[in-house]
Amino acid sequence: MTDNWLGPKPGSHMVVAGGCGGIGAELVREAVDKGLRVTVLDLAQSRAAQPDMQGVDYIDFDARNAASISEAVAAIGAKTDCVDSFVFLCGYPILPRRPLAEVALSAWNELMEVNLTSAYLLAGGLLPLLRKSDQAAIVTVASSLAYQVMPGMGAYAASKGALVSLTKALAMECAPHVRANVVAPGAVDTEFLGGGRGRDSSADRSWFDDMAAKYVSTIPLARVAEPSDVTGPIFFLAGAGSKYMTGQVLHLNGGRLTP
């Protein structure tokens, strides 16, 4: 442990929803290395895509299903009486990209269930455990698309814009005992670009790869983000280094967007 670590203290309990995805798996690996106690919530098929990490508690759940979310929260409560940080990483885009007029209502509803409603239900369910911590923090992962919408990604952008507002509402309503902040990454080089790990999708990432050179040319730091570019800011917002921050958004896009 380096002296300049600004994240959660060793031994603290972090719950990660979506902890088997590209960013989530990296976050969990780093959290274990830092001595955190970690509970991961994710789809069974996402968990099956990689070996379980030693020392991590895994709870299978489906973010589309309110009963599954309630069961996951109850399972956490059965194992612990305190959660110090909750990181929300669930989310996926509708691929292939399409205009809003071509998004079926069923697809819209499912996207909102996973990207937004599950955050609302999980945060509400975990609040009693978070309030028992003296360092409680919620960190949600939104997207730069909430601020700079890309044609064909309107439904995803809407869900992430709403997630930002939800997090700000949690920050205001849960202060001063629980902080809530957002990270809003640009494109990150993970399976998400092909629809997300563990989802039943025939989409591939060619839609992004075909425009990658043009996209990177608009980024001052001249590259697409890697998962570790996002995990550091998440740890910062979950730890004592950000103890006077709540209701804020950290934009992680290599300088492409500076709101």
Image: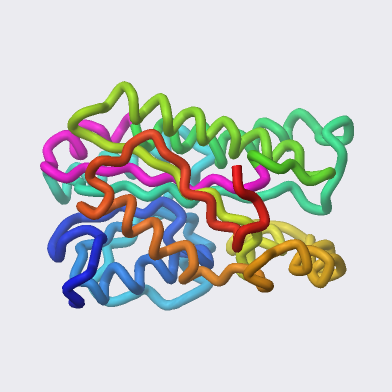
Which residue is depicted at the point 23% across and 72% down? 34
* Residue 20 position within the rendered picture, expressed as x and y whole percent measured from the top left: 46, 64
- Residue 229 appears in the picture as rendered: yes
The quadrant the N terminus occupies is bottom left
Q: Is residue 142 left or right of residue 106?
A: left
* Residue 214 position within the rendered picture, expressed as x and y whole percent measured from the top left: 83, 66
Q: Residue 99's quadrant in the figure?
A: top right
Q: Is residue 14 left or right of residue 65?
A: left
* Residue 148 position within the rendered picture, expressed as x and y whole percent measured from the top left: 71, 43
Q: Is residue 235 left or right of residue 178?
A: right
Task: Find out whether residue 225 is within the magenta segment.
Answer: no
Q: Is residue 128 left or right of residue 172?
A: left
Closer-to-camera residue (49/152): 152
* Residue 146 position within the rendered picture, expressed as x and y whole percent measured from the top left: 64, 40
Q: What stretch of residues is rendered in magenta?
A: 124-145
How many labels were placed on the picture?
0
Closer-to-camera residue (234/43): 234
Q: Residue 27's quadrant in the figure?
A: bottom left
